[in-house]
Amino acid sequence: MERALLVGAPLKRPGARRAVDEHLKELAELADTAGADVIGDMTQQIDRPDPRTYLGSGKIEELRDRVAESNASLVIFDDELSPSQGKNIEDAIGKRVMDRAELILDIFATRARTSEAKMQVELAQLEYMLPRLTRMWTHLEKFRGGIGMRGPGETQLETDRRLISHRIKVLRERLADVQRGRAIQRQSRRGEFKASLVGYTNAGKSSILRALSGASEVFVENRLFATLDPLTREVDLGDRTHVLLTDTVGFIRKLPHHLVASFRATLEETSEADLLLHVIDASAPTWEEQRVVVDQVLDELGVNDRPKLLVFNKIDLLDQETLMGLQERISHLVPSSVFVSTVADGGLEPLRRALLGAARARRPLAEIRMSPTDGKLLSEIHREAEVVDQQMDGDELVLTARLNDALAGRLRRAGATVSNGNGNGPRS
């Protein structure tokens, strides 16, 4: 197991000292998830990163001493390093150096289960690796030839660049095929009410999906990035109303850009959602920062304009006074927010009611006039719609029901008349 020393170097600004402690705590969780043994950390507030070694020369010397004293085999920086910075730091301390982006990519590689997730992670890793190949081949430098000659190190380096570039092209083409396949799947679900769970990693999205759907096969683990593949399950909300609920990959601060780009096909599920459920870990001290991070990623994906419901999860971990203070504050800022727990009895009822209200709003009341002798059509209405009232009007059967546009279209084609709830004109 790697013995890891963590390094945080926030820019000098108000609150930076307090924030760096939380950031290093999260970095330690990432390192633990990746299988490293965290043996300590080191911090320095900087005006701006040194273009050569990120930290100042004095701090690099201190880092070299700390590595030697602690017998660390790996140094992990909380910020993304340029290829030259990573190489220069490794040369200075004599140990392997990773940055936060590389660590997250490594975790995703171990978590990928399906062929799609594996392709997405591999693409992100290769795009991250390509500009850093020179650093990875430093152990061959002594074999390089002089003027007019090419040593095996350089030849292999160029070969690797060509192979990686070709592999990147192949993966992009395959993921484009996946994207087209997903678009076809979404077409088949066009008439359904759809909601997507989004949020910071480990906010409890998978626990919510499992608890609402009753699907025991939904994987839940109290670790970062337990879920990479989108998973959709049908949730029965009662009153003949259901929702297709999709769990998505969690976000995190400084999520590597390559990773967001690679997972774009997966995350496009959110663009088709009628409602985004932004799950927030109410017990996390940095939940406000985490909320901003998620909004930034949603902005990058171009889906932050979708209807959104804030879902404050894990309220069972808060004492009553803290919970009441949080609820009062949020009620003024975002009144429609809900507070839930997946472990308390009835803890998800506020979310279930909110989903039912959103689904009903999408399925307004309609008046259906039809022949009372068409038992097959009547059975379909009772099976797929929420019938509120049913009575005879002369020789016509008149029903008042909540139904989606797809069912309304089928009823019209079968000869029924469908209008809005007050009977004034056709339903659009």
Image (cartoon, helix red, strand yellow):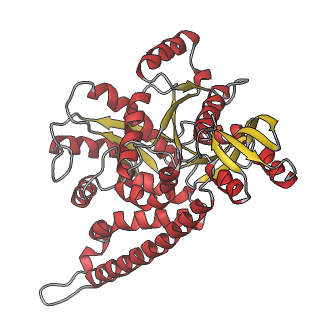
Q: Is residue 219 visible?
A: no
Determine the residue positioned at 41% across, 21% down: 333
Determine the residue positioned at 40% across, 43% down: 304
Which residue is farthest top?
Answer: 321
Q: Is residue 261 left or right of residue 284?
A: left
Q: Which is nearer the eye, 233 or 394?
A: 394
Q: Which is nearer the eye, 410 or 172?
A: 410
Task: Name the spot of residue 196 as percent of width and height, x first.
Answer: 55, 45
Look at the picture and state if 77 lies above or below 211: below
Write down the quadrant of residue 83 in the picture.
bottom left
Tally of numbered discs? 0
Q: Is residue 46 left or right of residue 365?
A: left
Look at the picture and state if 183 lies above or below 95: below
Which residue is farthest front?
Answer: 394
Q: Is residue 229 visible?
A: yes
Which residue is farthest left?
Answer: 147
Task: Name the spot of residue 313 as percent of width and height, x first.
Answer: 57, 29
Determine the residue positioned at 36% across, 37% down: 41
Q: Which is nearer the eye, 377 or 326?
A: 377
Which residue is farthest bottom?
Answer: 148
Task: Name the spot of residue 116 as percent of width and height, x first.
Answer: 55, 66
Q: Which is nearer the eye, 348 or 195?
A: 195
Look at the picture and state if 274 lies above or below 96: above
Write down the quadrant of residue 140 in the picture.
bottom left
Task: Name the spot of residue 88 as percent of width and height, x first.
Answer: 22, 57
Determine the residue positioned at 66% across, 47% down: 418
